[in-house]
Amino acid sequence: MANFTVRGPFDVPVTTKKAGRIITKADISSFWDARPGIAKTRGCYVFAFRASKGLKPIYVGKATKTFSQEVFTDHKVRKYNDALADQVKGTPVLFFVALTTTKGPTNKTAIDDAESYLIQLGLAANKELANDRKVKVPSWSIQGVVRSSKGAVSKSAQELKRCLSMN
């Protein structure tokens, strides 16, 4: 079985310009210089904003090469910068869900499965997640457990969530 470990959240440095905040190549270099151990690992990552009301996921990605090769590619930085333009307050952060297995070939299937799962969790937390793929939301819900409307959660739903370690 593939195992992952969570690292972060790590603040993402930004540069403030007249029109707002952006992530520059210098910011990216600074970010990786401070985290050489994470830069060379693989797995999934979540770009989010931290504000007074908690954390809001913006984009979920995977890195089957290394995090430093995939997290800040041009098209992803464009997504992050678009989010920065829309988000007046909050600190951009990154979480890494790093594959802990280092022997043998990279378990791309496990990374892909974890990414799919994290995207679905991200969509549940933010319907405007910036991902383009794997964003089809299933057409079912379980009231009080998953994708349900707002309102009181029944004791039965609370117990099921506790049973399934969803709390």
Image (cartoon, rainbow, N blue to C red):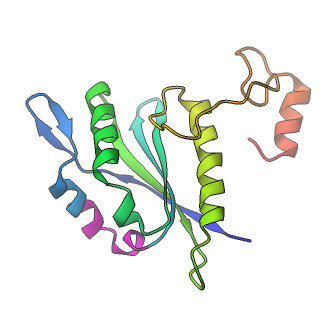
The answer to whether residue 72 is above or below residue 153 is below
Q: Nearer the viewer, residue 20 or 133?
A: 133
What x and y, as percent, mark residue 114? 63, 55
- Viewer can see residue 88: no
Quadrant in the picture for the C terminus: top right
Q: Is residue 93 left or right of residue 31?
A: right
Quadrant in the picture for the N terminus: bottom right
What x and y, as percent, mark residue 146? 75, 30
Q: Residue at x 21, y 62 (%)?
A: 30
Residue 134 found in image quarter: top right
**What span is in magenta?**
30-40
Q: Is residue 15 magenta?
A: no
Q: Is residue 33 magenta?
A: yes
What x and y, as percent, mark residue 54? 48, 35
What x and y, as percent, mark residue 109? 65, 63
Q: Nearer the viewer, residue 30 or 123?
A: 123
Q: Residue at x 78, y 16 (%)?
A: 152
Q: Is residue 151 left or right of residue 126?
A: right
Q: Residue at x 76, y 42 (%)?
A: 166
Q: Is residue 76 left or right of residue 138?
A: left
- Viewer can see residue 128: yes
